[in-house]
Amino acid sequence: MRIGKEELKNLRDELEKMTDFIAVMEKGELPYFYRYFDTMKNNIEIFICVGSDDTEDIVSILERDWKASHAMLIGVQDYDVRESHPDADPILCLYFAKLLSNIGRYFVQT
């Protein structure tokens, strides 16, 4: 997928939804992968503020952080909302999966 400025803004919005969701769910210690999503969001914010049109460099940085967020045993793929919140509505698991999918679609290799 070619990521332009408009796609970066949409990705930033999706990352904002994800970080907000995690912060609300985990009111104490945040999961390890959270830092990567927050960093990605902040890097996009900086890129937009700088006003550059060349997205090639920022995309490679975002891809690096996306891969890092999937580290074995501590990555986003091992996060389970219901593990730390057994009484949570199962819909929250689906919502989390949707958020992750919405972000992941920007990093699909074609």
Image: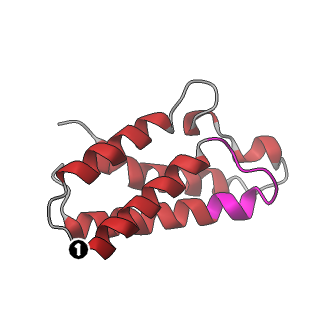
User: Residue 80: x percent and y percent?
Assistant: 69, 41
Image point (65%, 39%), residue name: 79
Q: Is residue 59 above or below residue 47?
A: above
* Magenta span: 21-32
- The residue positioned farthest toward the top in the image shown: 72
Circle 1: element type: loop
Q: Residue at x 78, y 55 (%)?
A: 88
Label 1 sits on residue: 51
Q: Amino acid at mark 1?
A: Gly
Q: Residue at x 40, y 53 (%)?
A: 103
Is residue 42 depicted above or below 51 in this figure? above
Confirm whether residue 3 shows in the render.
Answer: yes
Image coordinates of residue 2 in percent, x first then y, are: 15, 52
Q: Residue at x 85, y 53 (%)?
A: 87
Q: Which colour assignment does the render follow?
A: secondary structure
Q: Quadrant of the C terminus?
A: top left
Q: Is residue 74 magenta?
A: no
- Total residue callouts: 1
Percent coordinates x, y for residue 4 in the rendering = 18, 62
Query: Is 95 in front, or is 65?
Result: 65
- On screen, residue 100 versus residue 45, left or right, reads right
Question: 16 or 59, which is in the foreground?
Answer: 59
Q: Is residue 22 magenta?
A: yes
How many other residues sit within 10 Å of disc 1, few (<14), some (14-19) or many (≥20)? few
In the figure, 52 relative to 83: above or below? below
**Of residues 9 and 79, the one drawn nearer to the viewer in this rendering:** 9
Judge from the rendering whether residue 83 lies leftward or rightward of residue 78; answer left or right: right
Q: Is residue 98 visible?
A: no
Left or right, residue 28 beside residue 50? right
Residue 5 occupies quadrant: bottom left
